[in-house]
Image (cartoon, rainbow, N blue to C red):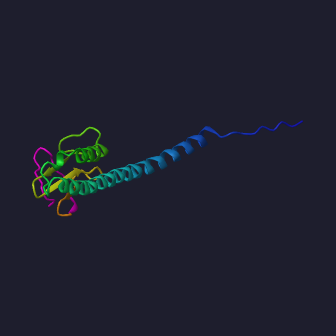
């Protein structure tokens, strides 16, 4: 009788497969991180656009003035969600730093974005929604998006 043995994979073949999988992983993961950051920024933009509607309701309820609108619980909660979406621990001037400022006739809200460390998203009472230079909540005093 002739014994035939089935051969398995050699160590070299297994190492080659592992190396190929590692190379593919190193190519794909940075793309996924960039896509995740863009998704986070889209959520921030959506939250800030919701503030526009909330400010309009606040203004109607308070006799056509925005004063105190940024202290309204609906607006503070939306700002908190927008900033915590970007950075769970907020740092002044960093990712997720944001601010809402309201006067009697104007208001604006902005949050620094994650996909680009040099930009922020800003919305205001005039209907502007735009990318602006990254801001610092301790020094910024925007009532209108530039």
Q: Quadrant of the N terminus?
A: top right
Magenta span: chief secondary structure = loop
Image: 23 above or below 131: above
Along the viewing direction, whichever of 71 and 109 lies nearer the viewer = 71
Q: Is residue 134 magenta?
A: yes
Mark count = 0
Q: Residue at x 86, y 37 (%)?
A: 2
Along the viewing direction, whichever of 74 and 19 lies nearer the viewer = 74
Left or right of 18: which side holds 51?
Answer: left
Q: Give the image location of residue 48, x and y in percent.
A: 26, 54
Q: Give the image location of residue 78, x and y in percent.
A: 27, 47
Q: Quadrant for residue 119, please give it.
A: bottom left
Q: Give the image location of residue 62, x and y in percent.
A: 16, 53
**Name of the residue lying farthest toward the bottom:** 127
Q: Residue at x 38, y 53 (%)?
A: 35
Q: Residue at x 14, y 54 (%)?
A: 66
Q: Quadrant for residue 42, please give it.
A: bottom left
Q: Is residue 116 magenta?
A: no
**Which residue range is magenta in the image?**
128-146
Q: Give the image location of residue 102, x and y in percent.
A: 13, 52
Q: Quadrant of the C terminus?
A: bottom left
Left or right of 39: which side holds 20?
Answer: right
Left or right of 90: which side holds 137?
Answer: left
Along the viewing direction, whichever of 40 and 119 lies nearer the viewer = 40
Along the viewing direction, whichever of 32 and 91 lies nearer the viewer = 91
């Amino acid at each position: 009788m002739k014994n035939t043995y089935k051969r398995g994979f050699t160590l070299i073949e297994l190492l080659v497969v592992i190396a190929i999988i590692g190379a593919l992983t190193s190519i794909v993961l940075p793309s996924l991180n960039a896509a995740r950051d863009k998704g986070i920024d889209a959520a921030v933009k959506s939250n800030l656009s919701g503030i526009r509607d909330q400010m309009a309701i606040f203004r109607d309820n308070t006799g056509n003035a925005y004063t105190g609108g940024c202290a309204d619980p609906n607006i503070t909660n939306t700002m908190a969600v927008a900033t915590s979406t970007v950075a769970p621990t907020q740092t002044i001037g960093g990712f997720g730093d944001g601010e809402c400022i309201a006067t009697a006739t104007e208001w604006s809200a902005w949050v620094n974005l994650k996909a680009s460390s040099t930009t922020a998203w800003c919305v205001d009472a005039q209907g502007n929604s735009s990318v602006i230079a990254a801001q610092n909540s301790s020094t910024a005093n925007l009532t209108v998006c530039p």
